[in-house]
Image (cartoon, grey):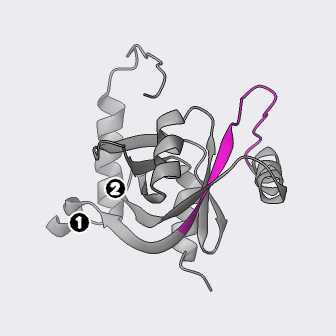
Amino acid sequence: MGILTEDMKRVVDEQRLGFVATVCPDGTPNLSPKGTTAVWDDDHIVFADIRSPATVSNLRRNPSTEINVVDPMVRKGYRFKGVASVLTEGALFERILDFYRAERNLDDSRIKIRSFVLVKIEEALPVVSPAYDLGLSEEQVREKMQRYFDSLPRNIPTTRREET
């Protein structure tokens, strides 16, 4: 058995959005959301480099990283610390690409995948909202968050920009 528990795998598989932290050349942090975050095996998490030039550049220089995956409805999740490998070709790259095609319906003919980042997880810890310190149950937190999201305006304009 590896470091990733069944619950950790469940959260990653359900949420798919991981926030990946790296260190820039000047020592400042870089935090970037990755909507392709997936469990590769009992000890690895993977994500696709679709538009991640700063993240990948930082990981090539310093492969230490942390990925946070949190369910926003229950405000619980996990933080995964590990060491990243950037894959641009080879048998493992092809196996990961096949996984994304089959499991995530990723059509790489429409999306340019530059590489995959495979992170060997060395430490995995829970992330739990302080709301639980107040004695709230998971269902109460979920209901509170549902009310919050339901109260948000639905006509918020969106913008799209390149990662820097």
* Image quadrant in which the C terminus is located: top left
Q: Identify which amino acid the numbered label 1 is placed on.
A: Tyr
* Region of the chain picked out in magenta, as a range: 104-120
Q: How far separated are the C-alphas under marks 2 and 1?
A: 9 Å
Q: Which mark is residue 24?
A: none
Residue 127 lies in what quarter of the image?
A: bottom left
Contact (Cβ within 8 Å) of mark 2 with mark 1: yes
**What amino acid is at disc 2?**
Arg
Residue tagged 1 = 132
Locate residue 33, reporting x and y percent: 46, 41
* Residue at the spot 44% in from the left edge and 65% down from the top edge: 80
Identified at 83% across, 52% down, the residue is: 94
Majority secondary structure in the magenta region: loop
Mark 1 is surrounded, within 10 Å at the Cα level, by few (under 14), some (14 to 19) or many (20 or more) other residues, namely: some
Name the spot of residue 52 as percent of width and height, x first: 54, 36
Decide if residue 34 is in sight here. Answer: no
Instruction: Check the image and report above or below for 53 versus 76.
Output: above
Residue at which label 2 appears: 75
The relative height of residue 82 versus residue 21 in the rendered view (above or below) is below
What is the x, y in percent for residue 143? 33, 50
Quarter occupied by the N terminus: bottom right
